[in-house]
Image (tube, rainbow, N blue to C red):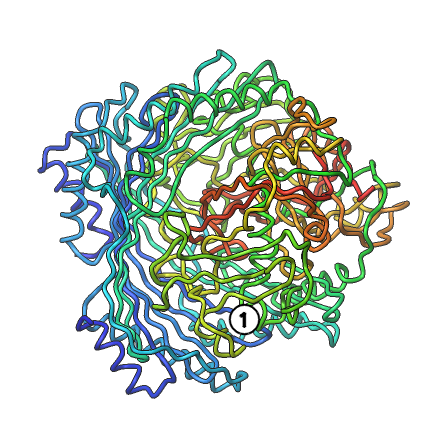
Amino acid sequence: MGELAKSALKVFEKAGVDFGDMRTEERRSTTVRIANEQLQALSSVVRKGFSVRAFHHGAWGYGSGTSFKLDSVRRAAEAAANIARANAARGLPRSSLKSIKPTRRRVKPVMKIDPADIGLDEKTELAMIVARAQRFNPKVASTFAIYGEWDYEFQVASTFGTDVSWREVRTRIGGQAVAAEGDKRDFAYDFADGTGGYEIVKAVDPNEMGKTIGMEAVELLTAKKPPSGLMTVITDPDISGLLAHEVMGHASEGDEITKRRSFLTDIVGKKVGSPLVTMYDDGTYPGAHGTIQFDCEGTPGHKTKIIDRGIYAGYMHSLETSGTLKMPLTGNGRAENYSRRVWVRMTNTYFAPGPDRFDELVEETKDGLLTHKSISGMEDPVGGGFQAVALMGHLVKNGEIGPAVRGMTLTGKALEILKSVDMASKEFKLSGGFCGKGEEDYVPVSSGGPYMRSKIIVGGG
Amino acid sequence: MTLLSLADDAVRKALASGAKAAEAFAMTYRTKSVYIEQDVPKVAEDRTEAGIGLKVAVGKRVAFTSASLEGQKDVGAAVAAAMKAVKMVPEDPDFPGFTSFRVMGKVEKTHDSKTAEAPVKDLVEMALETTAAAKVRKDIAVPKGIFRVQDYELRVANSEGAEGSHRGTLVFLYFTAKSGTKTKAGEGIIKSLGVSLSQQDFQAIGKRLGARSVENLEASALRERIAGTVVMDPLDLGEMLIQTVGSAVNAEDVRRKRSPWQDKKGKKVAAEGLNIADMPRLPAGLSSCAVDDEGNPTADRPLVADGILRDFVHDHYNAALLGGKGGNAFRRAVATIEGAYARPAQCSISNLVVEPGTQSLDEIIGSVQKGVYIEKLAAPEVNPFSGAFALEVRNAAIIEKGELKDHVKYALLVGNMFEGLKNVAATGRELRPSHGFLTATGCCYLPPMAFDGFELVGQK
C-alpha cells in the first residue's frame, strides 16, 4: 500500500466513518481510426487519477482528483468523510457493508502478446485491411475501421484491510460500412474484442471481417421490410445476449433490488423461464470483454448463476447490497473510472448453451424470423420490458433460411419471452461492448448466448 | 503557471521536440453531484480534474495524445508520446494544418457563478426538493436520481498563433419515480439540462416526474394501430434529430458520403416553413462558446431555411477540403464535461436550434382530431443513415378531437425521421434543450412538434 492510500485511510479512521477506501487508476489507451481507407485519427490517452470514498451510517461521500500530492489526496478524503457524515446525519436508513477478509494481492494480466510490444504501424495496417476489404462493391459509399487497446492499472486499499493491485488489458478490431444506392442508405458492422493482448485481434482475418461488413451493408439496400406482430423468432447470440443483459441482467443488479426498483425483487426460487433457460454473470470468463480480476471495491471477479433451468437463482452484488441483503459477494461493484461512483454492474452476462444444433432450430421452424446482430438495447428493470434493435434478419419458411429483411425492433415482456423458449442451440457466442447504468457510467462488458427460439413481438423496418 | 496555461507550454515543447505544428487543448473542471436512492441522498460527490489534449504534426503526419494533468511533467510525457506516435503513422495527404485565429470575447450567460459555487449541501437540498415534489401520491418513491453541477474552463492554443478560452457551467438532472405495488408498477423518468441552477424549477420537475409514473402505471397496453398525427415532447425528439439531422449536416459525414443530405444543398429536405440553424452564439446555450475546441471562432449558421438545405457545419479540416467555414470542432458533451480533453476535436453541431412556431403544446394537441402525444420513449434511437426507427413508448396518450384521452404503453412508434421532417404538421413555441449520447458533442434546442406519417403500433 502506498503512502497516499495510507494517508487517505488514516483520514477515514480519524473521521470515525464506518468504512473508507482509495482506488488509484492509470488508464492508457490507443485507438487508430481509418475512414475511407485513410487515417482519420491516431489517439493515445493517459488518464491517471484517484477516487476516495467514505461510508457512514448508510451514506457515501466521494472525492477524486488528478493531483497525486499528499495534501490533495488528504483534502479529498476529508471532504468525502464530511459529505458522508453530513448526509448520514439526515437519518438515512442504516445499512452495513459486507466485510471481506483482509487481502493483499498483486495480479498480472492474462495475455500472450502485450500490445505495447507491437508497433503502431502494424496496428494501423491491420485496421487499414479491414477498411479496404469493405470496398468490394461500388455501392459501398463509406468505410470505417478501428483498432483499440486499453491498458488499465488499478490499486484498491480499504479500511477492511484490502490491498490489491492488478492490470486489465483489452483489445478490439472492428469496422462499419455505409452502402448507398440512390436515396437509399444503410450500414453494417462487425468487431472482435476481449480481455487479453494483441493475440485477440491477431486471431481475426481482417480481409474476411471487412468483406463481410461490406457485403451485409450492400445486402441491406435490397432487404425487405420485416413482418410485424407476435411471431416465432430465432434470436442470434447477439440478441439472446441483449435479452440476458438488458432485462434480466440489469434487473438482477443488487442495488435495483435494495431500491425495490426491479421487477425481479423477491423472486428467488420462482419460475422465470423455460427449463432451457440458464443464465450467468461471469467475471471470470477467460478472455471475454467484461472479464475482471477484481471489481472496483477489491472483490475478486466471480461466476454468479442468475437463472438455473428456468428458476430464478440470485442477484449480483457490491459490498453494500451484499451486506444489506445478507447475500454472498459476487464482485460486481464497478465504476467507469476514478471520477465516477461505484454501482452494481454486470461483467459477462449470458444464457448457457442448449441441447440443439442451430440447423435444427431452423429446420423445425415453419414460419419465423432469424435475427442477425444487434444495434442497441434498453433496460427496463421496473417493467421487465424488452427492447432491442437488430441490425437485420432473415425470414425462415418451412425450415429454410429465406430472404434478408431490414433491421427491426424486438419487444415484449421478458418473462413471457423466456417462458416461451422451446429450443436453444449448442452454438454459443459472446460479444463485447460497453454498458451504461441508465444513461451513464459505461463499463466494459460482454453478453451473449446460444441461438434461442421463442415468441417475440417484432416491429419496424 | 496555471494548469490552463500548460496548453501554451505543450505547444512550445512539441515544437522544440521536432513537431512542425502543434495544437493543445487544456481544461480544468469541478463536478459536484448528488445521487438519490430510494428517496434519500445516498451518495454525494465533490471531484476535480484537469487534462490536456495535444495534436502534433510533422509534415502530413498527425497524431493526438492526451493526459490528465498534475503539472508540467505530464505535459512533457504527453509531448514525448505524441512525437513517438507521429513517426509511426501514415501521412494524411489532406491535412490542411491548424487554424490561425485569435478569438476574443465570449457568449453571454454560459457561466453562472452562483451555480459554480453552490456547495454540495445545497445541491442535496435541491435534489430532496425534487424528490419530495414527485410524491404526488403516497405510493410514489424515487428509487434513483442523479443531480450534477459542473464548473469548467478551457484554453486552446496552437503553433500558428491561434488561441481562445471559454468558461461554462452545466447542470444535469435525471430522476426516476416508481408508483404502484410490487405486482403492478409504473415508472416515470425525467431529465433536465441547463447552464444555471436558476433555470431549474425543482417543484415542477418533481411533480411532472411523479405524474409520469402514475400515467405509466395506469396506461393500458395498446392493441391496435394508430396512424394519425403524432405530437412529440422535445426531449426525446431532440435526441432523434441530433442523430439524423446532426449527422446529415455534418461536413465529415458529407465528405465521407455517409450523409443522406450530401447532394441535397439547395433542395427540399423538410417541410415549408421549417427552419433549423446551428447557433453556437445562443445566450445561455449548453454548447455555446465564442471559440470552438480547435481555436476557430464560432458563428451562427442557417442550415435548413424554409425547408431547403442551405449549409453544413464544418471543422477546420473539412472546411479546408469542402470550402466551408470552420468553427464546429468540439470535444465537449453537454450532459457531462468529464474527459473531454481525452478526445480529439471532431466536426459536430453545437446548439442545433429548430425555430419555434407560435402555438403552445396545448394548442397543438387541441388542433389534432386523431393522434397520439408521445412524452417519453424507452430509448430514442434512429438509424442515422436511413432515418428509420421503431421505438417503444413509455409515456404516451391518445388524442381524440383535440383532447388527451387514455395513456398507452407496450407500443412501438414507427416511422422515418427524414420523411417526418417533410411532414411537420405543427411546431410549438417553447424551446427546450435535449442532448444525445452521454459523451456526444452538441445538443438540440427545439419546441414540441407534430408529424404526420408516423404510426403507433400496438401488440396485434
- Front residue of B205 and A273: A273
Where is residue A285? Give x, y as percent. 41, 52
Extreme residue toward the front, this view: A355
Residue B275 in which image quadrant: top right
Where is residue B432? Give x, y as percent. 61, 49
Give the residue at mark 1.
B36
Q: Is residue A351 above or below residue A38?
A: below
Residue B240 visible: no
Kindly identify the amino acid type of the residue bearing the numbered disc 1.
Answer: Ile
| Lateral position of residue B452 relative to residue A143, left or right | right
At 10% across and 33% down in the image, what residue appears?
Answer: B18
Disc count in the image? 1
Q: Is residue B429 above or below residue A339?
A: above
**Chain ID at mark 1:** B
Q: Is residue B407 above or below residue A257?
A: above
Where is residue B326? Give x, y as percent. 38, 29
- Front residue of B63 and A372: A372
At 68% across and 52% down in the image, what residue appears?
Answer: A418
- Front residue of A237 and A444: A237
| Lateral position of residue B59 relative to residue B426, left or right | left
Residue B2 visible: yes
Extreme residue toward the top, this view: A138
The kind of secondary structure element at disc 1 is: strand
Where is residue A333? Give x, y as percent. 43, 65
At 52% across and 46% down in the image, what residue appears?
Answer: A448
Extreme residue toward the right, this view: B401
